Amino acid sequence: MAKTYRIGTRTSPLALRQVEEILEVLRKFYPDFKAVVIGIDTYGDKDKDTPISQIEGTDFFTKEIDEALLNSRIDFAVHSAKDLPDTLKEGLIIAALTNSIDPYDALLSKDGLKLAELSNGARIGTSSLRRKTQLRKYRDDFDIVDIRGNIEERLKRLDTGDLDAIVIAASGLVRLGLEKRITERIPFEILKPHPLQGALAIVVKAGDLKLHSLFSVIDSQEVVLL
């Protein structure tokens, strides 16, 4: 396996760690697998103002990487599976989906309080419409505040801002070694997570049968059936 594959990914610490995770698994099957990481800033990384609820299901976080793949500037892409658009660009396919490393939504609070213990009117920062809707259903007194940015930026806002808590995917914290920041993994009956939360997706060109076959060893049908 002499070829050195070019992997496209976003440039956040979490995205780069996700690539490392994929490479670690691949090298269990292909010890001589060689790759170089190509970091690509997407529009979603640059635009920190548009609420996630307005762009869910779109290619907000994948468009530039998809274009690099279609134009053969990279050989395959690694994404958080839940960042994928509802419909992939023509000419691209998902070669593999991994098992979720942790499917839960996590509460991180300033005072170590669990969701049920937060004070009346507590300000909670989160992004997705799914989380906002379910949190309001659980307790309509919460002041839900829209937040954007990578995990480090969200943690900084919790630590230095006026938020009482934030809700983010537990998987990102686990991957970055920040699991100790989790106050509570929110029970599924309160917050039902995105079906692909914590899973990773490898995207290749539809006609690249060699790569599609290569990644079949790490493809998990369990994720597809969630």
Image: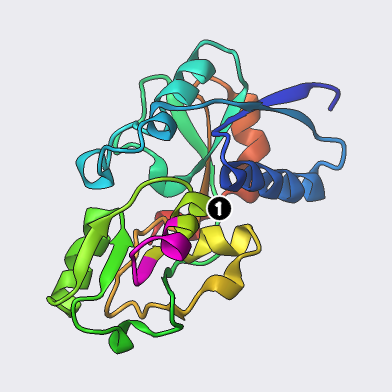
Give coordinates of residue 76: x percent, y percent: 59, 28
Q: What amino acid is labelled 1 in the image?
A: Thr
Closest to the observer: 62 or 94?
A: 62
In the displayed structure image, the side of residue 203 where residue 114 appears, left or right: left
The residue sitting at 44% across, 25% down in the picture is 92
Q: Is residue 87 above or below residue 146?
A: above
Question: What sort of colour scheme is used for the picture?
Answer: rainbow
The residue sitting at 56% across, 31% down in the picture is 77
Closest to the observer: 143 or 133?
A: 143
Does the segment drawn in magenta span residue 165? yes
Give coordinates of residue 54: x percent, y percent: 20, 41
Give coordinates of residue 170: x percent, y percent: 49, 66
Q: Quadrant of the N terminus?
A: top right
Q: Which residues are magenta?
A: 157-166
Q: Is residue 6 above or below residue 57?
A: above
Q: How many marks?
A: 1
Give the class, few, some or many, for how many residues have Cα within 10 Å of label 1's Cα (few <14, many ≥20): many
Can residue 100 be seen at all in this image of the molecule? no
The residue sitting at 54% across, 54% down in the picture is 220
Task: Determine which residue is flagged by label 1.
Answer: 98
In the displayed structure image, the side of residue 122 where residue 179 appears, left or right: right
Q: Residue furthest top?
A: 71
The residue sitting at 33% across, 36% down in the picture is 85
